[in-house]
Image: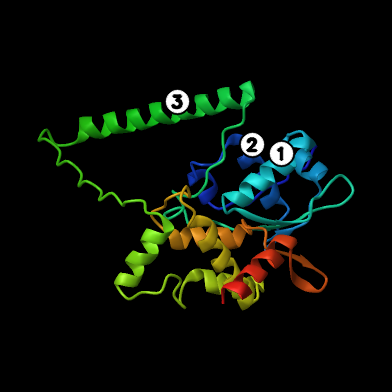
Amino acid sequence: MHESTFSLVPLEVIKDKRLTLWQVRVLVSLFSFRNKNTDTVFPSRRAIAERSGMHPSNISAATTELVGLGWLTKEGAGGFSKSSRYTITVPDLETVADSTTVAEPTTVADSATRMRVVAAATRKEQTIEQTKGESANKSAPTPPKARKASKALSLPDWLAQVAAVGQKAIPDTDPVRRYAAQAGIPDDFLRLCWFEFKARYSEPDAKTYTDWRQVFRNAVRGNWLKLWFINQDGYQLTTTGKQAQQHLERDE
């Protein structure tokens, strides 16, 4: 009899509505390689493909997308003979709504499956609401309070707003500083990341967000700006990072 392999995953995996079916498969597969003492795993693409039921050529794309969504940090290109290093993180879903989302896969099978899942969930919600309505008091229900919509701002406008109330853009108590300390990211690298982050998102056509602090946390966790890498000597700057460092030194 075949022995089953189990994967212990947090509820955020099924709560994160940004995740596509193939991203969930890869993420659950990565959790299955994790032990209780570490969040870092080293499976090869072939090993992930075997557990997720996907083709090995799609694994790199899926893990890269999971990095962008704040679920992973990834070191190394990986391959059939050399494994990448994956560190699993759980994003804060309450503040991640404005983060970059990844497009749905274009395969007909995955798209059809996703549509069936959404339709089934919708029917279930309708059935639950109908049951509640039949058992509730005949009196008209009190309408829910309207949520106060937050206005998305450009980074320069948000920085001006924060400065106007006497706050720091990234306070000393911000979770990103604790994460950087735990991950071993040097303080000057974190400072460089914030400098480059401001430069890129202050462009005239840059995106707008409601929670810029969370966007920066995601950028640090996912190394969005590709400023550093890790080798046997610890954290090192990439070519992009060295260019940003020169820019920072000239700016000062």
Q: Position of residue 128 (x, y in %)?
A: 33, 33
Which SS class for mark 2? Answer: helix
- Foreground label between 3 and 2: 2
Q: CA distance from mark 2 to mark 1?
A: 8 Å
Compared to 20, does 30 lie above or below?
below
The disc at residue 52 is: 1
Q: CA distance from mark 1 to mark 3?
A: 24 Å
Residue occupying the point 30% across, 71% down: 164
Q: CA distance from mark 3 to mark 2?
A: 18 Å
Residue occupying the point 20% across, 47% down: 145
Residue occupying the point 74% across, 63% down: 238
Type of amino acid at the residue the image marks with label 2: Trp
- Tell which circle, 3 or 2, labels the residue nearer the N-terminal end: 2
Frontmost residue, 134 versus 65: 65
Q: Position of residue 34 (x, y in %)?
A: 70, 57
- Tell which circle, 1 or 3, labels the residue nearer the N-terminal end: 1
